[in-house]
């Protein structure tokens, strides 16, 4: 009688399949007797059925109701007192804004609306009422503050022009162009009434008591753009100086009723927004180490589009 190894080698493929099926009971599970002969462990089928179908049913939860499936799922870590405490420790600013959202939702839905015939309610005007009275009683002080404010605006413009012409960094100039264009469009779209207590001066920018847009403040936005460019250039001390002068400028504009509070707040946001948009615009133009795509300009012109 030939050895079993030779018999298995000479068997046909169909015989091999039949032998494998007999050894595993036809379902992929080794025969118990065979397992005992080999010293292995007996394999039991899964409860509720055998084979792959039972595993699939167990995975989809057919063996239990919806409540059992829900209890088997682990709840998120933040859905607990410890998780909420961890969020408050790691993200206090986000938690503060969340509380602010709830607070001002209540304020907005209950605050009395300003009647159509009444003047606008501005808390910045209320906070600067004493300064307004002092400046109104001293015309020379109004003109002096207006002249100083015009000097600060000229400082902003001078720095932005220096950055693009002398240093080849156009981001602040592009941001200023975007900002003033958008301001003009919005100013034409919605013209706010001039405050009744407005203190005009021929020394204020634009010089000559000409008309101007209230929304939003170009004075404030221009100072923000210049200060952001200074920080990128490493001139942090100069940037802090501009921030401080910008704050004083905002107080003066409120005291003279040259802008509403919302004009100043949106001016800060506009400066930051258009500085970011100018950066994205220039980043999209820079290709292959600073060259502009499709440009045949000389290297000095290419420098205007580098960071």
Image: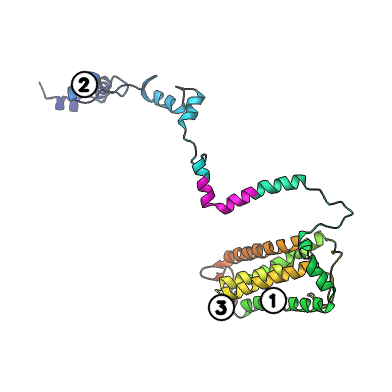
Q: Residue at x 21, y 21 (%)?
A: 34
Q: Residue at x 70, y 71 (%)?
A: 248
Q: Which residue is mark 2?
A: 34
Could you say which quadrant of the image residue 181 lies in?
bottom right
Q: Residues within 10 Å of mark 3 (few under 14, many from 20)?
A: few
Callout 1 touching callout 2 (CB < 8 Å): no
Between disc 1 and disc 3, whose residue precedes?
Answer: 1
Q: Residues within 10 Å of mark 2 (few under 14, many from 20)?
A: few
Q: Residue 126 or 215: which is nearer the viewer?
A: 126
Is residue 60 located in the magenta-colored stretch of the structure?
no
Q: Residue at x 22, y 23 (%)?
A: 35
Q: Residues within 10 Å of mark 1 (few under 14, many from 20)?
A: some
Disc 1 secondary structure class: helix
Disc 2 secondary structure class: helix
Mark number, residue 157: 1
Q: Say whether residue 54 is visible.
A: yes
């Amino acid at each position: 009688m030939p050895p079993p190894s030779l018999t298995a080698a000479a068997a046909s493929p169909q015989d091999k399949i039949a032998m494998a099926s007999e050894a595993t009971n036809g379902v992929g599970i080794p025969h118990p007797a065979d397992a005992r002969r080999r010293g292995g462990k007996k394999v039991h089928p899964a409860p509720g059925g055998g084979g792959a179908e039972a595993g699939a049913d167990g995975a989809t939860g057919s063996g239990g109701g919806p409540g059992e499936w829900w209890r088997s799922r682990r709840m998120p870590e933040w859905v607990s007192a410890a998780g909420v405490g961890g969020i408050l420790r790691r993200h206090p600013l986000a938690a503060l804004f969340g509380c602010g959202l709830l607070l001002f939702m209540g304020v907005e839905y209950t605050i009395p609306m300003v009647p159509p015939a009444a003047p606008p309610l501005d808390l910045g005007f209320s906070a600067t009422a004493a300064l307004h009275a002092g400046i109104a009683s001293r015309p020379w002080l109004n003109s002096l503050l207006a002249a100083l404010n015009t000097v600060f605006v000229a400082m902003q413009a001078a720095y932005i022009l220096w950055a693009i012409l002398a240093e080849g960094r156009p981001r602040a100039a592009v941001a200023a162009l975007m900002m003033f264009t958008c301001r003009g469009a919005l100013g034409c779209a919605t013209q706010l009434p001039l405050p009744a207590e407005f203190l005009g001066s021929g020394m204020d920018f634009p010089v000559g008591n000409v008309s101007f847009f209230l929304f939003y403040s170009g004075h404030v936005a221009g100072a923000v753009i210049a200060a952001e460019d200074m920080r990128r250039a490493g001139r942090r001390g100069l940037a802090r100086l501009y921030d401080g002068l910008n704050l004083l400028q905002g107080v003066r504009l409120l005291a003279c009723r040259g802008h509403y509070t919302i004009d100043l707040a949106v001016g800060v946001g506009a400066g930051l927004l258009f500085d970011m948009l100018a950066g994205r615009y220039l980043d999209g133009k820079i290709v292959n180490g600073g060259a502009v795509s499709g440009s045949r300009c000389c290297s000095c012109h290419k420098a205007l589009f580098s960071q």
